[in-house]
């Protein structure tokens, strides 16, 4: 479906067809793992740390949710350059509670 249709009667998107916007704010934490965990009043040893990446924001959030991460710390977007092409990817460290493993 072309959302940028220039016809006189463009198709309207119904609520059922809309793609929900992922709740990315709870995953994008730029502080370090130890700072974030101490702000929760817990120890870093209560969590398994796992590096994750995503080819786009939706993929990144999907990977974090699949690992049952409570948050992703040290979040950073970065461009990877391959010859003349550059690709934006997302990186971070997933905090996974050990009791959920």
Image: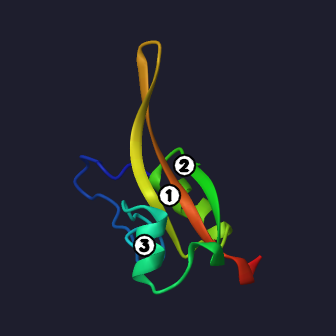
Q: Quadrant of the C terminus?
A: bottom right
For marks 3 and 1 on the same chain, the one whose residue lies earlier in the sequence: 3
In front of the other: 71 or 14 = 71
Residue 33 vs 83, above or below: the answer is below
Secondary structure found at label 2: strand
User: Contact, CB < 8 Å: mark 1 with mark 2?
Assistant: yes
Structural distance between the alpha carbons of marks 1 and 2: 8 Å
Of circles 3 and 2, the one toward us is: 3
In front of the other: 4 or 80 = 80
Q: Residues within 10 Å of mark 2 (few under 14, many from 20)?
A: some
Locate residue 39, reporting x and y percent.
39, 80
Q: Residues within 10 Å of mark 3 (few under 14, many from 20)?
A: many
Residue at the spot 56% in from the left edge and 49% down from the top edge: 53
In front of the other: 5 or 29 = 29
- Which disc, if any, is residue 37? none
Locate residue 11, reporting x and y percent.
35, 61
For marks 3 and 2 on the same chain, the one whose residue lies earlier in the sequence: 3
> Which residue is denoted by mark 1 in the rendering?
58
Q: Residue furthest right?
A: 101
> Which residue is denoted by mark 3 in the rendering?
36
Locate residue 33, reporting x and y percent.
48, 65
> Which residue is denoted by mark 2 in the rendering?
54
């Amino acid at each position: 479906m072309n959302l940028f249709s220039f016809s006189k009667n463009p198709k309207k998107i119904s609520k059922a067809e809309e793609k929900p916007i992922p709740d990315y704010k709870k995953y994008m934490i730029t502080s370090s793992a130890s700072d974030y965990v101490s702000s929760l009043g817990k120890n870093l040893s209560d969590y398994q740390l796992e590096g994750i990446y995503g080819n786009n924001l939706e993929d990144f959030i999907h990977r974090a949710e699949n690992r049952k991460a409570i948050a992703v710390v040290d979040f950073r977007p970065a461009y990877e350059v391959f010859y003349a092409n550059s690709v934006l990817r997302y990186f971070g460290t997933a905090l996974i509670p050990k009791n959920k493993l």
